[in-house]
Image: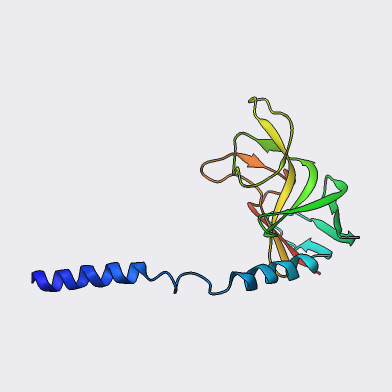
Amino acid sequence: MKRHLLIIVFAFIVSCNKKDNLLPKDNLIEKQEKIKIVDSISGIYKTEFDSISNCPITLKISSHEGNYFYNLVTSKRNLKGKIYFINDGSFLVLEGIPWDEYEGDINKELDTEKSSVAENGKDIPKGIPFLIFKDKLKLQNFENSMNNYIPLGECGTKNVQLMKQ
């Protein structure tokens, strides 16, 4: 019985130490794929009609001489500005847009600008971060169980998805 238990424990330890199967074999391919997505990010993105959230958003992304620019149109805003990329091109940030609500630090990895101070004494971030996929952009628009924030108050949906047209 002890022998079987030792064999099972040994097999488990050996299988846990085999990290080759868990990691991608070539990280360069992943980085090249991200670069291709960033290079083809220009275009028009829109939310799909949803009668529950009623959140029409149009985002036009253009590039000029290696810089990216946006025109964001919602039911309450028509803004233009510059885009920058963070986390090796996984996120794009619409620069200069103050969040509608913010009560805490959501993620120190998201490199957003700081704006004025909220009623609770915390800095209100500027810059709306979207996660980049091949033909869509995704924004987590309000709090999870640990944080209270709303970048785009005019949208009553937690996950805003903009589809490339």
Q: Residue 88 location, x and y as percent?
A: 67, 58
Residue 10 position (above or below residue 155): below
Residue 106 occupies quadrant: top right
Query: Which residue is drawn at the image coordinates 11% and 72% (left, top)?
Result: 3
Residue 75 position (above or below residue 29): above
Query: Which residue is drawn at the image coordinates 15% and 69% (left, top)?
Result: 5
Q: Residue 77 location, x and y as percent?
A: 84, 45
Count of marks overlaid on the render: 0
Q: Residue 35 location, x and y as percent?
A: 73, 67
Identify which residue, 124 or 114, lies in the foreground: 114
Location of the C terminus by quadrant is bottom right
Location of the N terminus by quadrant is bottom left
Query: Which residue is drawn at the image coordinates 79% and 67% (left, top)?
Result: 39
Q: Residue 16 location, x and y as percent?
A: 34, 67
- Colour setting: rainbow
Identify which residue, 147 or 13, lies in the foreground: 13
Q: Is 157 left or right of 48, judged from the image as shown? A: left
Residue 56 occupies quadrant: bottom right
Identify which residue, 50 or 63, lies in the foreground: 63
Identify which residue, 145 or 126, lies in the foreground: 126
Query: Which residue is drawn at the image coordinates 83% and 45% (left, top)?
Result: 76
Residue 157 position (above or below residue 96): below
